[in-house]
Amino acid sequence: ERCFRLDPWFEKTQPAEFAAVVDSVETQTYDVDAARGAGCWRVSRMIPLAQAARHYGLPHTYLASSKLEPGRLARYPVVMLPNVSCLSADQRRMLTDYVRAGGVLIAAGETATRDEIGRPAGGEFLAEVFGLSACLPRPGTAQFEAVGSPAAFADLPWPDEVTGQYQEGTNHP
């Protein structure tokens, strides 16, 4: 019974939400490497990014791509896109607004190069949010080149500054 003494305190706690790792059903469905299959996307792309967050002690959760909404995004100081190649125009707009509002967006691999059903999309998202343009990758490669300093970068803290604020207790998701 001694172990239940703290139950009233634990009932009042909530998990810390710092980073969201986006789980993209659209990418798994419409942009799958035929040799690997949809199940491999989670194992080869999403889980390694989450493991990196865990390794550095960043509290994180998984966020379904269908839940990319301004209210949900605002809860996370950091959003990670692990090779999320398929994003709708609305999702790209919400992520751009998130960055403009001070959120930190981390992209790994091919990002936002296709729409929600796998058709090639323009590179405006990468140019505006990251200051990059990308060619559709040849098998095993992606080419990036700078396109200037995007407005979305203005006055943003570096991710290590945000992490430091979180660890010091001055930045609360």
Image (cartoon, rainbow, N blue to C red):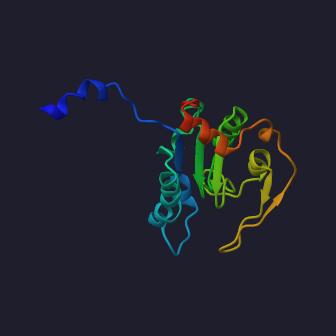
Q: Is residue 42 above or below residue 76?
A: below
82 or 113, which is in the foreground?
A: 82
Residue 7 point in image, percent of width and height: 24, 28
Q: Is residue 4 left or right of residue 42?
A: left
- Counting the numbered discs, the total is 0
Q: Quadrant of the N terminus?
A: top left
Q: Is residue 155 above or below residue 37?
A: above
Q: Is residue 25 left or right of residue 117?
A: left
The residue that appears at 60% across and 51% down in the rendered structure is 81
User: Residue at the left extreme?
Assistant: 1
The residue that appears at 87% across and 50% down in the rendered structure is 148
Residue 76 point in image, percent of width and height: 56, 36
Q: Is residue 164 above or below residue 106?
A: above
Q: Quadrant of residue 74?
A: top right
The residue that appears at 86% across and 53% down in the rendered structure is 147
Residue 71 point in image, percent of width and height: 56, 29
The residue that appears at 49% across and 48% down in the rendered structure is 57
136 or 11, which is in the foreground?
A: 11
Q: Quadrant of residue 108?
A: bottom right
126 or 56, which is in the foreground?
A: 56
Q: Quadrant of the C terminus?
A: top right
